[in-house]
Image (tube, helix red, strand yellow):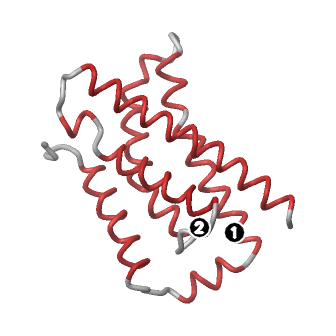
């Protein structure tokens, strides 16, 4: 595995590890936790997470559109950097993983994030089967995350 030119992977792994270090060692930032109890903060930070997830789907749109395909490589770079920053965005929304379906959403979100960090530029594999398996897994997890995100948004506003 070669990580030489994959700064987004380094940053993402650092933020991922930092999130779980604070979670498991109960490192608390009381000011942030107070903000996270406020309904308006939850909604605005949740909107930021939702926009991040929706924006990540733009790479698929760019890749599948003949007119936009020329922007695929720059968009892929943006996609990787946003993925690298996703643990930080998640942290500002919630310092914990949640319970029930939120725990499932968190697990899948972070699993897909890790899968994204070890993308094919990092692994350096030309194996077509590996590529297809990686891509199907990444897109399938992204779809599940999106469905759970929509469910979460509906529950938040239904039970307000």
Dot 2: element: helix
Q: Which residue lies furthest to the top in this view?
A: 66
Residue 119 in the image: state x and y as whole percent: 30, 38
Percent coordinates x, y for residue 102 in the rendering: 62, 62
The quadrant the C terminus occupies is bottom right
Query: Residue 91 at what x, y percent from top left?
Result: 50, 68
Residue in the foreground of this view, choosing between 33 and 141: 141
The N terminus lies in which quarter of the figure?
top left
Q: Which of 121 and 135 is in front in this view?
A: 135
How crowded pointer 2 is (Cα within 10 Å; few <14, some 14-19, many 20+) is rated as: many
Indicate left or right for 139 with 130 as reference. Answer: right
Viewer-proximal residue, 60 or 131? 131
Taking the spot 44% from the left edge, 55% from the top edge, the residue there is: 110
* Among the two numbered marks 2 and 1 on one chain, the one whose residue lies closer to the N terminus: 1
Helix, strand or loop at disc 1?
A: helix
Is residue 141 shown above or below 130?
A: below
Determine which of the numbered discs, if any, sits on residue 150 in the image.
none
Task: From the image, tell me which residue sits under label 1.
Answer: 42
The image shows residue 62 at horizontal and vertical percentages of 50, 23
In the foreground, 40 or 128: 128
**Residue at which label 2 appears:** 93
Q: Residue at x 35, y 76 (%)?
A: 21
User: Mark 2–mark 1 contact, CB under 8 Å?
Assistant: yes
Tell me the crowding category of disc 1: few under 14, some 14 to 19, or many 20 or more residues within 10 angstroms, Cα based.
Answer: some
What residue appears at the point 59 percent right and 67 percent down from the top-left corner? 93
Query: Which quadrant would residue 99 be assigned to in this image?
Result: bottom right
- Left or right: residue 119 versus residue 75 is left
Could you give the CA–CA distance between mark 2 and mark 1, rounded to whole angstroms? Answer: 6 Å
Residue at 67% from the left image edge and 56% from the top image edge: 47
Image side of residue 104 versus residue 110, left or right:
right
């Amino acid at each position: 595995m070669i990580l030489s030119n994959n700064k987004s992977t380094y940053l993402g792994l650092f933020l991922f590890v930092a999130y779980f270090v604070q979670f498991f060692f109960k490192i608390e930032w009381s000011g942030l936790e107070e903000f996270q109890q406020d309904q308006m903060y939850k909604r605005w930070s949740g909107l930021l997470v939702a926009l991040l997830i929706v924006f990540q789907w733009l790479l698929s749109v760019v890749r599948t559109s003949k007119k936009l395909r020329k922007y695929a490589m720059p968009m892929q770079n943006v996609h990787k950097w946003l993925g690298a920053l996703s643990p930080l965005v998640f942290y500002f929304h919630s310092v914990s993983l949640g319970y029930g379906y939120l725990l499932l959403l968190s697990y899948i979100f972070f699993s897909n994030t890790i899968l994204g960090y070890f993308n094919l530029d990092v692994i350096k594999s030309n194996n077509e089967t590996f590529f297809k398996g990686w891509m199907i897994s990444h897109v399938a997890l992204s779809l599940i995350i999106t469905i759970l995100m929509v469910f979460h948004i509906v529950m938040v506003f239904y039970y307000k």
